[in-house]
Amino acid sequence: MFFQYKYLSGFGSEFSSEDPRCPDSLPKGQNSPQKCPYGLYAEQLSGTAFTAPRSENRRSWLYRIRPSVGHEPFRPFPKGNITHSWGEAEPDPNQMRWNPFDLPQSGDFDFVTGLNTLAGAGDARNKSGLAIHIYSANKSMGDRCFYNADGDFLIVPQTGPLEITTEFGKIEVSPNEICVVQQGMRFSVDVGGPSRGYILEVFGQHFTLPDLGPIGANGLANPRDFLTPVAWYEDRDADGYEVVAKYQGKLFVCEQNHSPFDVVAWHGNYVPYKYDLSKFMVINSVSFDHCDPSIFTVLTCQSEKKGTAIADFVVFPPRWSVQEHTFRPPYYHRNCMSEFMGLIFGEYEAKKGTFRPGGATLHSIMTPHGPDLNCFEAASSEALKPTRVADGTQAFMFESCLGLAVTRWGAETCEKLDPQYFQCWQGLKNNFTGPK
Ligand SMILES: O=C(O)Cc1cc(O)ccc1O
Ligand SMILES: [Fe+2]
């Protein structure tokens, strides 16, 4: 089922692509000719206001067999556990750790019916905020596609590769890769078996690459490593094809009589893309002290406040650790930001063994956190030779300036919250040597 697709390389670029079965299917020199090549319809997909500054403006033109509007009315689709009701569970400032979320135990769940909202903040209606979802699926979507009217999905597979058919073409994304499908883009997910992962949804702004400042023109996630699919279409009648929309935090479904993946050619700069986390160029201290984890930012979704993210997507990649006279693991910390972490595979250096792949942690605003007892004891007396850290592991963080509410699913229904998490810091000793 899974095979190597072709991609276009670049981030935020103006791309164009034609399915090779229909050469010259992109209109020449204009977007809306009176008659498009091959009898196609022209449809614009806007990802920013028409009048957004040129540097931020995002839109694509799709040349398709039928326009998207040819569908029956939407009706509610009460499946899965998606919510934007942030008041469902009482606020809880405790450190939280979830054991690995379940893969589907029984029954059929696809990428949409297997979506569960874990935490979030803000409102998709006023275009500010975020949601964190866990997907757990064992079935391909078949004649069903999905689009999100509320915001962008950054998908982090943890178990199982996903084959994602989008209006722009096909993307294969495996654990240790991520994929961004932006607001409004229709897509359908095929799985090869039980599959699980994390989703960061942002309302309002799109993801960008972080500025590099004094780092210079290269480094961290390089633009050319972001891959966008090439045009692929099917001309397929399909009675009862379901289009599921996430709209204002709820799911809706409508039917149409054909596949929505009928885009023969497209051009523009509003596109889905994937990125292989192993391509991240890691920068760190080569003298002393522990850099803030912002040096590991892959993508950021900026708020209106300068330098302050609605959400940063941060990784903790395999790297060398060489700092001298330094406590090398993460420092103890209280943060004005919320820190949600997930683990794709391996172990996280500050919490070996107890934070498991497919699980998560949340350290909320000003909630103290940091290395567990074992990590502190080992790292404060280890010989400081150059060493490899995080080999065979991949932890990540969604860091947000917003206060996150945990949903009822996250607090109760999933039954994965571990009330013993606080124990990992309980044995931290008083090592004070006293005044001289
Ligand atoms: O483990 C964490 O909570 C994330 C984290 C990592 C780091 O290297 C420094 C600070 C920090 O919060
Ligand atoms: Fe922190």
Image: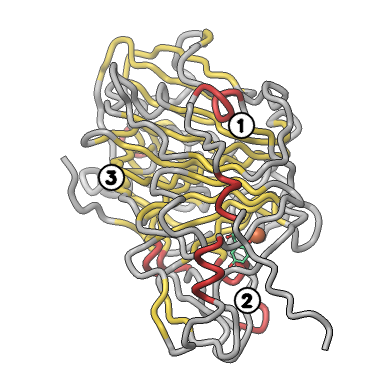
Tell me which label, 1 or 2, sits earlier in the chain. Answer: 1
Residue identifier under label 2: 291
Q: Nearer the viewer, residue 379 or 19?
A: 379
Left or right? Give the position of 295 relative to 224: right
Above or below: residue 348 compared with residue 150: below
Residue identifier under label 1: 150
Nearest-to-viewer mark from 1 and 2: 2
Which image quadrant shows ligand 2?
bottom right
Which residue lies at the image location 74% right of the left edge and 52% below the top edge? 303
Q: Nearer the viewer, residue 317 or 248?
A: 317
Q: Residues within 10 Å of mark 3 (few under 14, many from 20)?
A: many
SS under mark 1: loop
Amino acid type shown at disc 2: Cys
Q: Work out which residue is located at the far right of the displayed protein and give it.
A: 435
Q: Which mark is residue 161?
A: 3
Any atom of ligand 1 within 8 Å of the CB at mark 2? yes
SS under mark 2: loop
